[in-house]
Amino acid sequence: MKVREFQIEDTPQLVHLMDQLGYPTSLEKLEIRLSNIQSQANYHTLVAELNNKIVGMVGLCHNLFYEYDNSYVRIVAFIVDINHRRKGIGERLMCEAEKWAINQGATYIMLNSGNREERKAAHKFYLNMRYKDMSTGFSKLLDKQSAKKRP
C-alpha cells in the first residue's frame, strides 16, 4: 500500500468512497468539484493505493488563524474503503496528512466529524490518533432568499 498525491485520473475511483463517506455524487459532478479543488493552491488531496486500486483518501486545506499568528490544516474529507478498514491504511493517510501540514508550516491540524451513530468508530480512531475532542461544530445551509430578508 502506498500513499500518494491525488491525480485527476483517480476521480472515477473516488465516487464510491464519497458515497461511503455519506456524500453520494456522480462522476461528472465529482470531476468538476475535484478540478476546482485542484486549482486552489491551499488544497491538497492524498490517496491510498493498494494493488492499483484507490482504497482511501484525505482532503486537506491550509488556512490562516484569525486568533493566532500561525496557520493550521483542516482535514475536510477522510475515508477508507469499508472493505479495507483496520489494516493501517487510515493511520498511514493521517500520518502523511500531518507531514504535509508540517511542511506547510502549520502548527495545528484539525477536523470535524458528524455526531451520527455511524461515526462513532471514526471518533474512536481519531482519539487513538491523539486528536482531541475539543469543539462542537455548527453549520447552516445558505439560500439567497433568506439572506435578503435579514436586516
Image: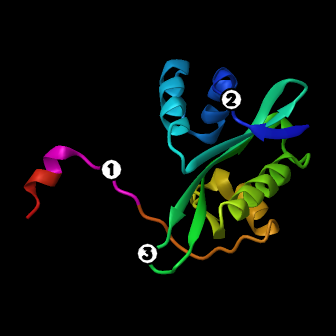
Amino acid on which the number 1 mark rests in the picture: Leu
Within-10-Å neighbours for mark 2: few <14, some 14–19, many 20+? few
Sort mark 1 into few (<14), some (14-19) or many (20+) by Cα contacts within 10 Å: few
The label number, if any, that marks residue 85 in the structure image: none
Residue 127 shown in magenta: no
In this view of the protein, which residue sits in the foreground, 149 or 33?
A: 33
The CA span between labels 3 and 2 is 32 Å
- What mark, if any, has residue 66 been given in the picture? 3
Q: Is residue 86 left or right of residue 37?
A: right
Residue corresponding to mark 1: 141
- What residue lies at 57% left-to-right and 47% top-to-bottom? 43
Is the C-beta separation of discs 3 and 2 under 8 Å?
Answer: no
Relative image position of residue 136 (x, y in whole percent): 51, 71
Q: Amino acid at mark 3?
A: Tyr
The span from disc 3 to disc 1 (Cα, nearest Å) is: 23 Å
Which of 50/37 is in front?
37
Tell me which numbered mark, 3 or 1, is placed earlier along the sequence: 3
Taking the spot 69% from the left edge, 34% from the top edge, the residue there is 6
Q: Which residue is mark 2?
A: 7
When asked about the image quadrant of residue 62, the answer is: bottom right
Q: Of circles 2 and 1, which is in front?
A: 2
- What secondary structure is marked by label 1? loop
Picture quadrant of residue 125: bottom right
Q: Secondary structure at mark 3?
A: loop
Q: Position of residue 94 (x, y in %)?
A: 77, 55
Q: Residues within 10 Å of mark 3 (few under 14, many from 20)?
A: few
Q: Secondary structure at mark 2?
A: loop
Say above or below: 49 vs 76. Answer: above
Indicate whether 55 appears above or below 88.
Answer: above
Percent position of residue 151, x then y: 8, 64
Which segment is the magenta one?
139-146
- Please tell me in which quadrant of the rendered image residue 10 appears: top right
